[in-house]
Amino acid sequence: MTNSFWSLVPAIVAIVLALCTKEVYSSLFIGIVIGGVFYAIDAASGFAGFFNHVFKDGMISQLSDSWNVGILVFLVVLGTMVALMNRAGGSAAFGNWAKKHIKTKVGAQVATICLGILIFIDDYFNCLTVGSVMKPVTDKYGVSKSKLAYLIDATAAPVCIIAPISSWAAAVSGFVSEGENGIALFCKAIPFNFYAFFTLIMMFAMVFMRFEYGTMSAYEKALDSMASDEAEDSDEEDNTKKGKVIDLVLPIVLLIVFCVLGMIYTGGFFSAQVPGENEGEMVANGSYLNFIEAFAGSDASVGLVLGSFAAFILTLLFYIPRRVLSFKASMLCIPDGFKAMVPAILILTLAWTLKAMTDSLGAASYVAGLVEGSAKGFQNFLPAIIFVIALFLAFATGTSWGTFGILIPICIAAFPEGALRIISISACMAGAVCGDHISPISDTTIMASAGAQCDHVNHVATQMPYAFSVAAVSFVTYIIAGFTQSMGIVASALISWVVGLAGLFGFLFFMKKKVTK
């Protein structure tokens, strides 16, 4: 069953089950079991071989891998930082500051988008923070709860997927084949993540063009000339009243700065050494690397752990002496942070194990052979096709990360090198983010509704027309990117961006004219 169509069956079953059951955990696990059965049949190893392959060679091996452990530790530290900043009251302090400095409805929406972009470390942190901070401000200027929920949701995953220093970048890099620099590949794919960029551009454009369409317009018109008094009521805990704006801003800045420093440190930026052939080995070469070389050659797993832990310690030293938080309250944030990241950790563990099963069956070499023998014209459509597959899979399962775990290894195996590989991986990430964005069972969709205190069904119904509009423009743009990939990365990106932006703004001007009429 190795190096044949059977090697793809575990991933296919996981995809089909996820679409049918809308539940990613059991779907991934069943795919893992099928992969173990196929391997045991091929090796004639019986039940003992099956259990050893699934748990020892699969799950335990993946969880004991130093790279994977580093990613999990980073997620736990990140979750702890999120809990720490929320408990310190930085979010509430920023909200109070915003109420004094923002004067218009447009300003309230722009501030919400900008805050969402600023919090690019993690989508959970984004949803948990932006809603609680900006709701009093948007209520004051008559922004509907549905519009606030859309702004929160549209600046969560779309921002994280184009930020090299984020939990999403770490997760994506974790699905990249061994021996490759996942962060470097992630960075190369950023310019082709059309859905994420076009979503952000569309939000700004619609705010300044001052129009809505679809079901969102009904909610906005109802509050267009109204200002809620909810912003005046605030019942905060004692520790929250002690928080200041700096208690939110400084930890985020520390996270960004020290994660970058940690990554370039592992890439040999601060010493005349470069990573050697063996894991963890540094070899002297007599010259220092520049920033780009060090970043591209970094060990993201170790660098993110070093950077996040340094930021965590400095944040404690910033909070505790000022009595913003007690030492005991700070330590209680550690289990809270771990609990918040359990779903992400579970998805990563199962996805890594499924990847191990398909790798052991030779799926990579089989898919590579199939794509190599396919027609050139068909390959040009593959990025757009991958975008649609990822969109529907993430929509049905409610998770981007599970989609990454299933599709990214397939993309890497199908496209060993070149522009088409980068474009296809971008299409996979963009489609997964789009599906996650509109899925009613997605964690971020649910948290965005909760953060805005918006009815969940209303949030899903009002943001779907916007998300599908951007998805349609992105689909066309991926077709252009597929046909221009032979011209090189830069030329393909430029042409695709020009066509995509023309399509997006053409659509927006058409819709505004239609709504106005």
Image (tube, rainbow, N blue to C red):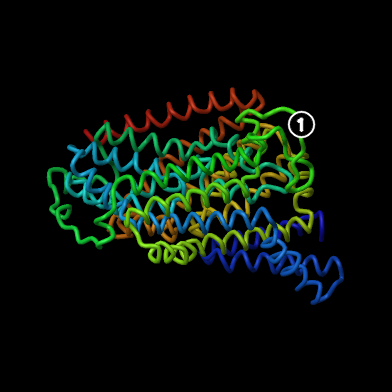
Closer to the camera in the image, 216 or 51: 51
Closer to the camera in the image, 73 or 492: 73
Residue 326 seen anywhere in this rendered image of the structure: yes
Left-right relation of 494 to 204: right
Q: Which residue, as the protein is rendered here, is positioned at the far front?
A: 321
Identify residue type, mark 1.
Answer: Asn
Left-right relation of 17 to 357: left
Residue 276 is situated, as x and y percent measured from the top left of the image, at 77, 41
Residue highlighted by disc 1: 285
Among the 4 quarters of the image, the one containing residue 180? top right
The residue under the point 30% across, 55% down is 89
Secondary structure beneath label 1: loop
Which of the image's four quarters has the C terminus? Answer: top left
Q: Which residue, as the protein is rendered here, is positioned at the far right?
A: 44
Residue 455 is situated, as x and y percent measured from the top left of the image, at 29, 60
The residue under the point 46% across, 61% down is 337
Which of the image's four quarters has the N terminus? Answer: bottom right
Residue 215 seen anywhere in this rendered image of the structure: no
Q: Count neighbours of disc 1 (C-alpha within 10 A) and say few if under 14, some if 14 to 19, many if 20 or more.
A: few
Closer to the camera in the image, 9 or 73: 73
Closer to the camera in the image, 16 or 436: 436
Residue 473 is situated, as x and y percent measured from the top left of the image, at 46, 36
The residue under the point 69% across, 62% down is 64
Residue 197 is situated, as x and y percent measured from the top left of the image, at 45, 36
Residue 251 in the image: above or below residue 340:
above
